[in-house]
Image (spheres, rainbow, N blue to C red):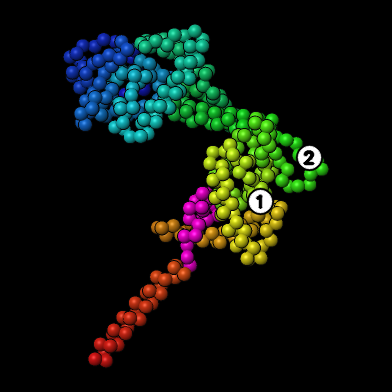
């Protein structure tokens, strides 16, 4: 059987030192609970044997492993695990342990709010009872996007982590949107300017972005559209109108603004040379057309170092900042010239030998 079999966990108890010796494990105690340890080839004692793999169990099975361990396979309750116990499995195992810990804490806290006492040692019946009490604490939709019912008892703990993260991200976005709407200042109907979107922050200062604004890390062409057209949906003016004051509270705001301005200016100049009209106010279509004409002005190498074609319009603007000005068409032609010169020299040597 595998070193840790989901669903076969039993409550911890006392075993003889003879049994422990036969299994290759030594027995200690962790907060009065059974605590097996194994000596690995590197000489380090860990709570799991070298053949152990991180369990991909469903949520209830993982909760049992967390609080009860796996008595049959002599594995301590996972709540006692340290990062050093799983380091031999690589970085992902450490991340798994941390994610499982956070998920189990959510269930435990919900169970506590209902009067359950989470002890250092728990038997199987207690653990299942506490799990059922704490399960509602996890933010989770019981229906799929197509309307089907989900059986939460069958879902792997890793799936629950994913859904919980998605829910948290959606909640943060909703909160940010709500705060932005509260800070938004209605534009003056008598102001014909296309730069009339303002947000009043808690310090009383009006800025072109809400306090929840994060500098967009998106593709070059999409950034060019935001630069000239702004974000109509979020009621944010074109980035080209931004000042340092507008992004004073944004992480790396002033630096990002300066770098984006330098890239966008080069695209504008090149597009202008090719006859494009760089208007103060553009439609999205006009902006994309200008970007496609002007991006070559950045002088970014068209191929990656390993020879693959580079999609410059789709690359992040931050990558464009790093790569701009690193491509010289005259340098690109030099290898061919060198080859031609080498061939000419070789022919000359042959002719000389023949003449002699």
Tell me which residue sits at (25%, 21%) in the image.
Answer: 37
**Res 64 label:** none
Look at 40% across and 27% down and name the residue there: 98
Q: Is residue 76 left or right of residue 167?
A: left
x then y, percent, for residue 27: 23, 16
295 or 108, nearer to the observer: 295
Q: Where does the magenta region start and end?
A: 311-329
Quarter of the image containing the N terminus? top left
Q: Which residue is located at x 59 percent, y 58 percent? A: 267
The answer to which of marks 1 and 2 sits earlier in the sequence is 2
> Is 312 colored magenta in this rendering?
yes
Where is residue 330 drawn, in percent x and y? 47, 70
In the picture, residue 205 is in which quadrant? Answer: top right
Number of the front mark, 1 or 2: 2
The answer to if 210 sits in the magenta stretch is no
Residue beneath label 2, please? 188
Q: Pointer 1: what residue?
A: 228
Q: Horizontal placement of 87 versus 337: left or right?
A: left
């Amino acid at each position: 059987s595998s070193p840790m079999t989901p669903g076969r966990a039993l409550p911890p108890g006392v075993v003889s030192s003879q049994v422990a010796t036969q299994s290759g494990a030594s027995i200690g105690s962790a907060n009065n609970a059974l605590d097996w340890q194994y000596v690995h080839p590197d000489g380090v004692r860990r709570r799991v044997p070298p053949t152990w793999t991180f369990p991909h169990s469903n949520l209830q099975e993982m909760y049992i492993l967390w609080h009860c361990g796996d008595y049959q396979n002599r594995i301590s309750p996972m709540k006692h695990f340290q990062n050093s116990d799983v380091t031999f499995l690589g970085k992902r195992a450490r991340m798994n342990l941390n994610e499982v810990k956070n998920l189990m804490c959510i269930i435990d806290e919900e169970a506590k709010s209902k009067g359950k006492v989470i002890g250092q040692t728990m038997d199987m019946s207690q653990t299942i009872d506490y799990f059922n009490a704490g399960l509602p604490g996890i933010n989770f939709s019981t229906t799929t996007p197509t309307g089907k019912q989900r059986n939460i008892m069958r879902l792997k703990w890793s799936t629950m982590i994913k859904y919980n993260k998605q829910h948290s991200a959606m909640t943060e976005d909703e909160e940010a949107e709500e705060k932005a709407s509260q800070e938004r200042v209605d534009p003056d109907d008598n102001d014909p300017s296309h730069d009339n979107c303002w947000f009043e922050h808690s310090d009383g200062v009006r800025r072109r972005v809400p306090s929840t604004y994060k500098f967009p890390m998106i593709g070059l062409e999409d950034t060019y559209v935001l630069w000239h057209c702004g974000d109509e949906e979020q009621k944010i003016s074109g980035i080209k109108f931004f000042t340092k004051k507008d992004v004073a509270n944004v992480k790396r705001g002033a630096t990002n603004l300066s770098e984006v301005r330098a890239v966008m200016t080069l695209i504008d100049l090149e597009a202008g040379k090719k006859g494009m009209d760089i208007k103060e106010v553009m439609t999205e279509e006009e902006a994309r057309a200008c970007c496609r004409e002007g991006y070559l002005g950045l002088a970014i190498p068209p191929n990656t170092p390993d020879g693959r074609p580079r999609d410059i319009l789709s690359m992040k603007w931050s990558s464009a900042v790093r790569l701009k000005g690193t491509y010289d068409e005259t340098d690109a032609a030099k290898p061919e010239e060198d080859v031609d010169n080498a061939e000419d020299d070789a022919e000359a040597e042959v002719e000389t030998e023949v003449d002699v």
